[in-house]
Image (tube, rainbow, N blue to C red):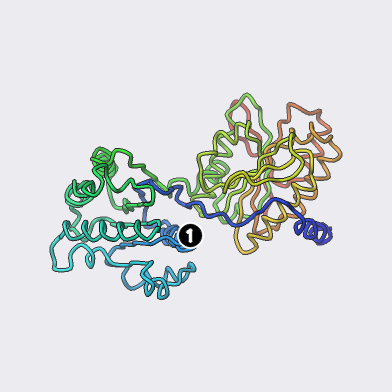
Amino acid sequence: MVSFIKNILWQRWKRSTASFRKYTESVLNVRNGEVAVVTYTPAADKMKAFSTFIHEGIERGDWIFYLYPDEESKIIRAKLREYGVDVEKNEKEGTLYLKSLSEFFMPDGSFDKGISIQFLLNRRERARRKGYNVREIEDVGDFSFLNGQWQQYAVDYWDNHKWGVASGVGVLYEPFIMELTAINVGSMSKTQIMEILKTFGGGKFTQTRFIDFFEYGDAFSRRIDMPHPKLLGRKFLLEFDPASDYETVIRDFARQAIASLEPTIVFTSSTSAIYTFLAEQHSIKFFLMLTAISTPESISEKEIVLPAKNTALILDSLSKILETYTEENVFLVFDNISGLIELVGFDKAYKFFLYVVEMLPQTKATAIFLLNKNAHDPQVVSRIRGLFHNLLTYEKDGLKIVKTSNV
């Protein structure tokens, strides 16, 4: 049945009016004009995150500036190639600038902050004149290139008054610049980490955002005591009480996907509590259900509206997603089953979700479906449950695991 359904959907996909492509919003949830301090630990696959961030920039035609810890000099280019970055081509064209921290800051053995700042200001100005956006990553590691003297970097360089010379308002916040300062906090004490973040947040550039990008790598897994690799490919039914804070479960599901750099797609509505919780996550793609439209329409880079009653077109969109991400794990949220039942009737809604569950590949799609069980009689709830091997419930007393499959 699965291949038959896919054949039908493939034909419909060719006629679909709404475009779908791999979105290029920043995996680190940072946009042009923003500056962020990113913390990480050695256990995290930071190169997957940074390489993807760089690859996104290259696809958009941005200029890339990347500084990395000295000890990574022998592996950095190989890692970038591994994640799809054509290092030699982009270095030759001048769009990719790679240096170790000591090569850039200490070419003569001493910390030359003035020359370093002026180099970056000049490079940014050239990019601005030519009409390019700029992505900068300064991965300072654990500050070992300064013998751990992070204050010297923060005060003398990062918060230096010269950054504001060009415009008088702090060129870090020009709309064409996206900057990350990454810090390895793995061997630091909690007190030291808090002191570092306070220093970076209390300086001249008060708009700085902090991202503990890897904090949520197991946010959902912790809730159900299931490691990330075992989570992949499962389809969960979450039965919820609308009076509870069930939205936090979906928030953690999405956070874990984002932290693992998995594409995250949410089928919902603009009035849903789920949408409210997740809307600020720039790397999530939303399919918003509306009853007032008859054809799909792209309303922004990350949002497509779909006719809520047309299950065939919703299936088209799902098929398109699966075709787009054939080689990647993708996380899906379907919010909510109850709303579709109300709109199209149980029989049609049940057939729709039967198709959806059968369409999803076992190893490439992880999905969670939401059902307000209080809105239906027990027979309806029982039939919906029969579609899933992994069942969760969330009421006022929290999340409970009813059953999970062995695979």
* 223 shown above or below 263: above
Measured as percent of width and height from the top left, residue 203 is found at 23, 40
The reply to whether residue 402 is in sight is: no
Name the residue at 18% across, 64% down. 106
* 156 shown above or below 127: above
Judged from this view, the residue extending furthest toward the front is 129
Measured as percent of width and height from the top left, residue 52 is found at 47, 60
Measured as percent of width and height from the top left, residue 299 is found at 62, 43
Name the residue at 54% across, 38% down. 279
* Towards the viewer: 103 or 169: 169
Q: Is mark 1 on a helix, strand or loop?
A: helix
Based on the displayed image, in which of its 4 quarters is residue 131 positioned? bottom left
Count of picture labels: 1
* 180 shown above or below 288: below
Where does label 1 land, which residue? 60
Judged from this view, the residue extending furthest toward the top is 243
**Quadrant in the picture for the N terminus:** bottom right
* 53 shown above or below 171: below
The reply to whether residue 363 is in sight is: yes
Name the residue at 61% across, 54% down. 330
117 lies left or right of 300: left
Measured as percent of width and height from the top left, residue 178 is found at 38, 51
Judged from this view, the residue extending furthest toward the right is 347
* Towards the viewer: 272 or 387: 272
Going by the numbered disc 1, the residue's amino acid type is Arg
**Quadrant in the picture for the C terminus:** bottom right
Q: Please rate how many residues cluster around mark 1, counting C-alpha atoms within 10 Å: few if below 14, some from 14 to 19, many from 20.
A: few
Name the residue at 67% across, 38% down. 335
130 lies left or right of 386: left
